[in-house]
Amino acid sequence: MSTLSSVRGFARPASLSFGRAVALLAGGVVVGIEHVMTRAELARSRRQLAQLDERLLRDIGLDRATARIEANKGFWS
């Protein structure tokens, strides 16, 4: 068997069964939900950052201006 024919055999598109299509769609939905949840957690963390006092900001190595910039970023950032 030549190398070209073995590559052609490997490169044939597999048929997509209904079950496989549903599994791919469900996986995409799960990834989307995880992405939204991650963004929501980031937004919550930014709101908490905005509420920290100067002493706590200094402890984590931030100044008020940097914390304000980060806290004002949107949900999508």
Image: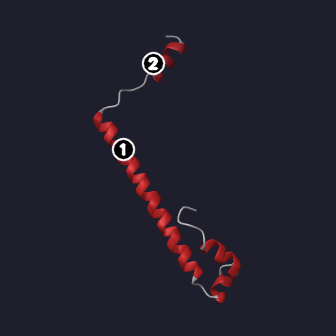
Q: Earlier in the sequence, mark 2 or mark 1?
A: 2
Residue 49 higher or lower than 39, as above or below: below
Q: Residue furthest left?
A: 19
Mark 1 residue type: Leu
Q: Position of residue 74 (x, y in %)?
A: 56, 67
Residue at 38%, 51% (x, y): give it.
Answer: 29
Q: Position of residue 17 (x, y in %)?
A: 31, 32
Dot 1 corresponds to which residue? 25
- Helix, strand or loop status at disc 1: helix
Q: Which quarter of the image is occupied by the C terminus?
A: bottom right
Residue at 60%, 73% (x, y): give it.
Answer: 72
Q: Which one is in front, 1 or 47?
A: 47
**Is residue 49 found left or right of 5 in the rendered image?**
right
Dot 2 corresponds to which residue? 9
Front label number (2 vs 1):
1
Mark 2 residue type: Gly
Q: Residue furthest top?
A: 1
Q: Could you say which quadrant of the image residue 52 lies in?
A: bottom right
- Helix, strand or loop status at disc 2: helix
Pointers 2 and 1 in contact (C-beta within 8 Å): no
Q: How many numbered marks, from 0 up?
A: 2
Q: Position of residue 71 (x, y in %)?
A: 60, 74
